[in-house]
Image (cartoon, rainbow, N blue to C red):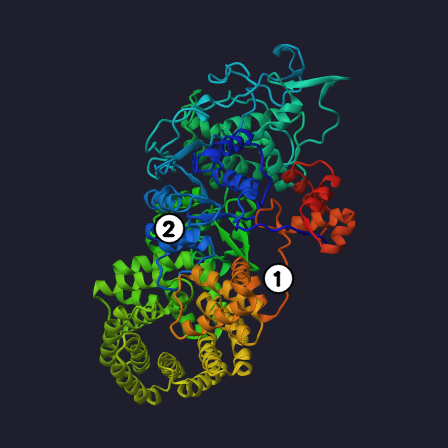
Amino acid sequence: MARLARRPGNLPAEPTSFIGRRRELADVRRKLADARLVTLVGPGGVGKTRLAIRLASDLGRGFPDGTWLVELAELRDAGLVANAVMAALDLRDQAVTEPAALVLSYLRDKRLLLVVDNCEHLLAATARIVTNVLRAAPGVRVIATSREPLSAPGEHVVPVPPLDLPPASAGLRPAGTSPSASIGQSARRTGPPSASTGPPSANPRPPSASTGPPLAGTGLPSASAGLSSERAGRPSAAIGQPPERTGPPSAGTGQPPERTGPLSAGAGVPLEWGGVPLVELRRNEAVRLFVERAAAGSGTFELTVANQAAVADLCRRLDGLPLAIELAAVRTRVLTVEQILDRLTDRFGLLTGGGQAALPRHQTLRTTIDWSHDLLTAAEQALLRRLCVFAGRFTLDDIEAVCAYGEAPEALNLLSSLVDKSLVLKEEVRGLACYRLHETMREYGRLRLRAAGEEEELDRRYTRYYLGKCRRSSVEARRRLVEWLAWMDLEIDNIRPVLHALTRQDTGRGLTLAFSLGYYWMTRALSEGAGRLDELLEQGGGRPHERAQGHFMRGFLAVLQSDAATAVPVLAEAVRLAGEAGTRSVLAQSLSLASIAASMAGDRAAAERLDGEAYTLVPESGDDQARLMLLQSRALVGLFHGDLDVVRSVASEGVRISRETGDLYSLGMMLVNLGSARLIAGDLDGALPLFVEGLRVAYEIDDRVAQYVLLDALGCHAAGSGRAPLAARLLGAAETVRAGAGASVLPFLAPLLTRAEESATAVLGAAGYAAGFAAGGRLSREAAIALALGEPAPPPADVPETSPLGRREAEVAGLVADGLSNRQIGARLFISEHTVDSHVRGIMNKLGFNSRAQIAAWIAANAKP
């Protein structure tokens, strides 16, 4: 199957078809031609994120360095906004450079588009980093989404209104006839017409939806009031209360009546709805969204003569809010549209006293969510409100440990039901099923949780679960580092709030938690870990062994940052506290680290003294971690001072112990040490396999500093082996990886790099070397590592991040392009023919096509050989 061309970036595939928004798409495109910051502003549930991602996808070709999504919804700490931008750009907080400085340095010469999503709870911090980026990087443009403007210099605000509404009902009638000729109405109506509908309009969107100031605050209402008050601004105009429905709902169990003929009053006479031909009603944004989501949810739903009146009224009643429409559409599995409309109309009537007054949009959404919530069983309600405790994505194991008790003792079936009702979103992360809440649903759940009086109990369970799991898993983390880091990458957004709370409430447990996260700080978040530990240690609480662990870990991070000024006193305190607490392993490791710090500070006498003290303790500790730390200390000090015999001896032992214990982090360091000693001594054949193995380890645990060091080392090896073109490319690739980690060149590597550059330049000439170096710098990390290992470059992904198709849809589209029938595709992919048909229809909806030939042409146009 042909592969789709890949463009740089991290945009997610759109999970469902994108509908409407032509005016908004065109408006933002025009603004971005001149402005560099455009903020999409609107209430929760109006579709800002989907619009921003579609814009970025459409505009991707104009940004050679990619389109990148920064998600802030799961972030609660304003101090980590720059870290979130850094992570989205695939940079790494693993050295001395602060995240904000690293981001600015990286973006300075880039031409890319940043999408910063869900900024409303971090306005000041987001405005600050965005302003600094735009000043430092003239080739960067930013699309932000928020419920309020960022108030940043040069910001252009684009209000995001609800979807276009269908016209007010005047009945179903033959085209060109008067309202009295209405036919085929789905239910008899009584009472006066809606006060706010007025005459039908070809563009029925309320003027306030696209003009006037955006809503300054559109959060959910408080639990006590039942409905929220506006934080600022005024409610937008909304469509009024539809008249009471008196006719019976259509018979059935959620499926529409079967269509028996064309939508016309007679031969050749088309029908109209409210003065608009029915074919145009089908194209209305709100109606299209409801129909497509209902069809996806129920499997057979379609717009018919019998249900179109209810569909149009329902979309108007929901004020065109996408989230509200989707929550209602999924209920067509068990209710007819008329039943959904009747139930919602009754609920809205309670809020307006039965009159025709319009509800503010945020109250419309809250009422729709309330209605969906009240249709749940008590157990489903309990689980839904408890899920709001998770700050980020969560797994079934997390749910069972934290939320499955009392009214909701069993999680799996309840969770499945909530996913089916679109109240919980399911995602796949590295082959693992994960779940999350829409931010509006998270806010709603928190209100319900507070009203149920469960907040304190759930917060206790949440803290106990994550603290206990981190403590238990840290014991085996070094032996199962790949698996542990994958778990941490997924769960860190849930763990951060626990650490934040413990910093203020229980310093001792906070220090224990921070210590247990050591490998995460070392390989993923060096400056964040240092900052968290500084906060905890400044509190002054905790028992001696807890504080000893905290000082040890803080000193370790300072050594990795090459910050001897911080490391020396912090590790001295760790030595004192560990001695007082009698924790021999922490004491021995602290002494070894202190020896490294003293050597970095130029105090060789202190380094030797501390090394001797550590050496006397290691046998007593009976701990291979303490032994490995001592060996690492001696290897690094030997490299600093050129004592290669010592380095070869201790690093060889370190490699052996690391392999025996399955300690990948230590193995990677020891391979670098031993390979470097052999390279410096001119033993090229002996160094090569060590560097190759070390690079494989560094890639497996995603240690960016080790990756850059080993790419440099292999570049030096290539230069020394007479392969100058390869050397130039590897050295260029290493420089890019080093800059992306904010690292500095290790002292013992500097002379090797100088010699390699001179050697390669002598062969290639200055221009040739520069061209090779630049070509290497443009490689992706994966391609650079493959080059260094002598392996084929990784193939492009089947689906580019910027593709509108999901992975399974891309597979189906490729097989359609290959000429396979739905039956053949189903057999190839082990799915039913009905499922294939659903995928094909979804592909056509997303791409705006109506034939399989168009899909095949699109695949061909976007394919690489």
Label 1 – label 2 distance at C-alpha: 32 Å
Work out whether residue 819 can be spotted. Answer: yes
Residue in the image at 37% along x and 33% along y: 227
Q: Name the secondary structure under disc 1.
A: loop
Residue 366 or 52: which is nearer the viewer?
52
**Quadrant of the rendered image containing residue 745:** bottom left
* Residue 764 versus residue 19 in the image, above or below: below
* Numbered label attached to residue 81: 2
Which amino acid does the dot numbered 2 rest on? Val
Q: Where's residue 354, x and y in %?
A: 43, 22
Which amino acid does the dot numbered 1 rest on? Pro
**Residue at which label 1 appears:** 794
Q: Where's residue 99, x and y in %?
A: 37, 56
* Residue 162 versus residue 833 in the image, above or below: above
Q: Name the secondary structure under disc 2.
A: helix
Residue in the image at 50% along x and 22% along y: 242
Residue 590 or 823: which is nearer the viewer?
590
Q: Residues within 10 Å of mark 1 (few under 14, many from 20)?
A: few
* Closer mark to the observer between disc 1 and disc 2: 1
Q: Residues within 10 Å of mark 2 (few under 14, many from 20)?
A: many
